[in-house]
Image (cartoon, rainbow, N blue to C red):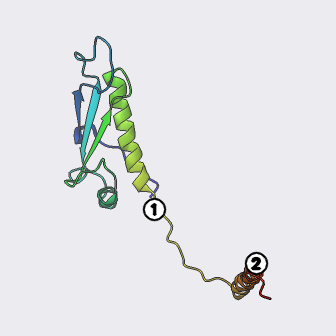
């Protein structure tokens, strides 16, 4: 899948909340942090992407299939809103690509022989370090 999927604005719920952490005089007055909620099951994403998003072991995905992202790194609501949307797009992009299936291979006979010869040689060296009996 190489197509890029964008999230429609009506599928995302954005709520302004007060940011955590240290602040100045404005900290208790301005709601500059953004809580983004995106319901994966109710979205218009392809079914394959929905299943991959729901299968993610990510703390941002709830049991109900809702992605919750909190953006509070910027001082303005607009910048935090853009950052939250960018993080959502990034999360969707991370499940968009399919990983290549690993094909199990067997070691060659000569590599097995080399490994066993090396083990025997190391064993000889270590045996030679033991106590000398008279």
* Residues marked 2 and 1 touching at CB (< 8 Å): no
The label on residue 132 is none
Quarter of image, res 28: top left
Residue found 30% across the figure and 36% down from its top: 70
Looking at the picture, how far across and down is residue 86, in whole percent? 39, 37
Looking at the picture, how far across and down is residue 54, in whole percent? 29, 57
Looking at the image, the residue that sits furthest to the top is 25
Name the N-terminal-most of marks 2 and 1: 1
Q: Residues within 10 Å of mark 2 (few under 14, many from 20)?
A: few
User: How many numbered marks, from 0 up?
Assistant: 2
Looking at the image, the residue that sits furthest to the right is 134
Q: Quadrant of the N terminus?
A: bottom left
Looking at the picture, how far across and down is residue 115, in whole percent? 70, 82
Residue found 38% across the figure and 28% down from its top: 73
Looking at the image, which is closer to me, 102 or 89? 102
Q: Is residue 100 left or right of residue 36?
A: right
Quarter of image, res 55: bottom left
Looking at the image, which is closer to me, 34 or 25? 25
- Local SS, label 2: loop
Q: Quadrant of the C terminus?
A: bottom right
Q: Nearer the viewer, mark 2 or mark 1?
A: 2
Looking at the image, which is closer to me, 56 or 3? 56
Looking at the image, which is closer to me, 57 or 97? 57
Above or below — where is 37 with respect to 108? above
Residue found 32% across the figure and 55% down from its top: 53
- Could you tell me how far apart the alpha carbons at marks 2 and 1 are, in whole angstroms? 52 Å
Above or below — where is 11 with respect to 47? above
Quarter of image, res 41: bottom left
- Local SS, label 1: loop
- Disc 2 target residue: 129
- Disc 1 target residue: 98
């Amino acid at each position: 899948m190489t197509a890029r999927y964008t999230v429609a604005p009506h599928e995302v719920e954005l709520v302004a909340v007060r940011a955590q952490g240290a602040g100045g005089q404005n900290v208790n007055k301005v709601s500059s942090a953004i809580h983004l909620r995106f319901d994966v099951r109710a979205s218009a994403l392809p079914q394959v992407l929905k299943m991959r998003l729901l299968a993610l072991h990510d703390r941002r995905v709830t049991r109900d299939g809702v992605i919750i992202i909190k953006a509070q790194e910027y001082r303005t609501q607009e910048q935090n809103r853009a950052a939250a949307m960018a993080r959502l797009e990034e999360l969707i992009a991370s499940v968009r690509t399919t990983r290549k299936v690993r094909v199990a291979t067997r070691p060659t006979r000569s590599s097995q022989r080399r490994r066993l010869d090396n083990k025997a040689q190391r064993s000889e060296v270590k045996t030679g370090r033991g106590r000398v009996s008279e």
